[in-house]
């Protein structure tokens, strides 16, 4: 935790240097067109800085530089132990500048400063350090073949990788993509979300300071529709990785087929079930039920937005959930005591407000919150919101809202809980709470999601893979399994 106060952070915010130019071939440059767009502080609605708005010509320049760097072998053929040391130095520089990065993320995204420092900044450095430390410990294989033959199975980098990252966790998600891609020897082009580009731009400069060769990492802020589609259709990009909405992920898959069949890995939406049985530790489950939805103002793809509660404890448990929700009051994100900041922009606020109206119209009962607050700040603050009387066919139970809205659904048996949990196009995350180990493990096994908590939510660290089933995507971030996304397997068959 930081020992800085609200006044300290406000003072730093008034003097922080913000870099808004693109990062291409080891240096900051303006977009070739000269175009810029403002990035907005969600807590005030005011512009923070003008940021380069890159287009196809900037992307072509970056791709050419990335390809040249890759083919030269300056990074792709560097010894894994040497690549490791560059990434470890980069992680150390991120730690050194953690307060600056946390402040940039807080101002740009609206996340509370306590989270951007302790979760995002230090989480990014842990990811980069872990990936660097792992790469010289990944061995290749010799296949079991007949006498007189030798078969080598080796891993080679894809080449040039485009990483399109979201606005809800810009710093940590950039690290999740870039760290394994660089560790395995690729050149990388990052396209941050157009409304939250600041930390990606800053850590690219820190990577150069750490010794990453020019041309290996580029950051191109710009519009997702035009710039993102140009990258996805480009014939000289070998792989693309994306975290964001399911419709955009599907479009990227189509672009892959329309171009060069570039490898495409997607971490997409969720409508995750959090299942509470009557024999659970209800106090612990209630506290985490609120956290699972209201953390980051609900702007979390794994958010436990469907709270499934066994009928016999429904009323008792919901009293505990609403009491726990009192800890999630929106406030100034620069205040270390704030647990919940604004939504990222006016559009996301409108989406949340629209879904609250939809829930009311569908016949659900809004029993907590549901209103805009702190409107006088100019920011996009919305109360934590809880609907009861929800059935799983309602839109508030089926569609990803990406706001602080919980839908509570009762169930009467283990089988019904599993059926409701799996009745979704998504399969990203979930949790089950029960003191009965057989109940807990059987439900965890049967719910079709990529990450399932047992008596916890948001569990996992860098040692385990992260990703989803069904329309929540493919591929995996984190862990050694992420290296699979950024490498090709090659067989060399030798006869002697």
Image: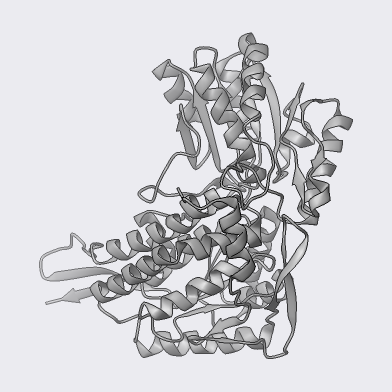
Instruction: Residue at the far right: name it.
Output: 361
- Residue 425: x and y in percent read 66, 42
From where the camera sits, is residue 235 visible? no
- Residue 273: x and y in percent read 60, 32
Protein image colouring: one colour
Image quadrant in which you'd find residue 153 = bottom left
- Residue 302: x and y in percent read 57, 43
Q: Image point 46% across, 60% down: which residue?
A: 176
Which residue is nearer to you in this view: 115 or 358?
115
- Residue 495: x and y in percent read 16, 76
Which residue is nearer to you in this view: 224 or 246?
224
Q: Is residue 456 above or below residue 332?
A: above
Q: Image point 75% across, 46% down: which residue?
A: 381
Which residue is nearer to you in this view: 183 or 169?
169
Counting every numbered tag in the picture gives 0
Q: Is residue 349 above or below residue 414?
A: below
Q: Is residue 457 left or right of residue 399?
A: left
Q: Image point 71% across, 50% down: which residue?
A: 343
From where the camera sits, is residue 470 visible? yes
Q: Is residue 325 above or below residue 163?
A: above
| Quadrant placement of the C terminus | bottom left
Q: Is residue 459 left or right of residue 314?
A: left
Q: Is residue 173 left or right of residue 221?
A: left
Image quadrant in which you'd find residue 297 = top right
């Amino acid at each position: 935790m930081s020992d800085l106060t609200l006044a300290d952070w406000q003072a730093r915010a008034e003097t922080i240097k913000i870099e808004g130019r693109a990062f291409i071939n080891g240096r900051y440059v303006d977009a070739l067109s000269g175009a810029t767009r403002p990035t907005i502080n969600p807590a005030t609605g005011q512009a923070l800085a003008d940021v380069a708005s890159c287009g196809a010509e900037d992307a072509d320049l970056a791709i050419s530089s990335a390809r040249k760097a890759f083919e030269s072998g300056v990074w792709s053929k560097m010894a894994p132990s040497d690549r490791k040391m560059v990434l470890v130095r980069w992680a150390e520089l991120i730690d050194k500048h953690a307060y600056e990065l946390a402040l940039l993320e807080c101002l740009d995204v609206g996340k509370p400063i306590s989270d951007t420092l302790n979760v995002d900044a230090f989480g990014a450095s842990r990811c980069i350090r872990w990936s660097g430390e792992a790469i010289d410990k990944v061995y290749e294989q010799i296949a079991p073949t007949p006498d007189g033959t030798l078969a080598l199975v080796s891993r080679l980098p894809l080449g040039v990788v485009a990483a399109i990252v979201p606005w809800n966790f810009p710093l940590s998600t950039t690290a999740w993509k870039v760290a394994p891609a660089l560790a395995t020897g690729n050149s990388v082009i990052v396209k941050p979300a157009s409304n939250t580009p600041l930390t990606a731009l800053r850590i690219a400069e820190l990577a150069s300071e750490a010794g990453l060769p020019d041309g290996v990492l580029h950051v191109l802020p710009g519009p997702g529709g035009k710039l993102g589609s140009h990258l996805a259709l480009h014939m000289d990009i070998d792989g693309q990785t994306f975290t964001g909405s399911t419709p955009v992920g599907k479009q990227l898959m189509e672009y892959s087929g329309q171009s060069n069949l570039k490898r495409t890995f997607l971490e997409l939406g969720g409508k995750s079930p959090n299942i509470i049985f009557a024999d659970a530790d209800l106090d612990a489950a209630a506290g985490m039920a609120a956290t699972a939805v209201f953390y980051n103002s609900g702007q979390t793809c794994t958010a436990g937005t469907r709270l499934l509660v066994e009928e016999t404890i429904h009323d008792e448990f919901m009293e505990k959930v609403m009491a726990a929700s009192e800890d999630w009051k929106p406030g100034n994100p620069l205040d270390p005591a704030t647990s919940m900041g604004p939504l990222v922009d006016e559009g996301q606020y409108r989406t949340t407000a629209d879904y609250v109206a939809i829930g009311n119209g569908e016949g659900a009962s809004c029993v907590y919150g549901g209103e805009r607050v702190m409107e006088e700040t100019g920011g996009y603050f919305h109360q934590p919101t809880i609907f009861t009387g929800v059935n799983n066919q309602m839109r508030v139970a089926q569609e990803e809202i990406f706001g602080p809205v919980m839908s509570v659904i009762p169930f009467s048996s283990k089988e019904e809980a599993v059926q409701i949990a799996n009745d979704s196009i998504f399969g990203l995350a979930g949790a089950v709470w029960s003191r009965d180990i057989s109940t807990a493990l059987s439900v965890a096994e049967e719910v079709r999601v990529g990450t399932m908590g047992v008596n916890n939510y948001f569990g996992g660290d860098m040692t385990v893979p992260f990703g989803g089933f069904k329309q929540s995507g493919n591929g995996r971030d984190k862990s050694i399994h992420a290296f699979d996304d950024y490498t090709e397997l090659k067989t060399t068959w030798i006869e002697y």
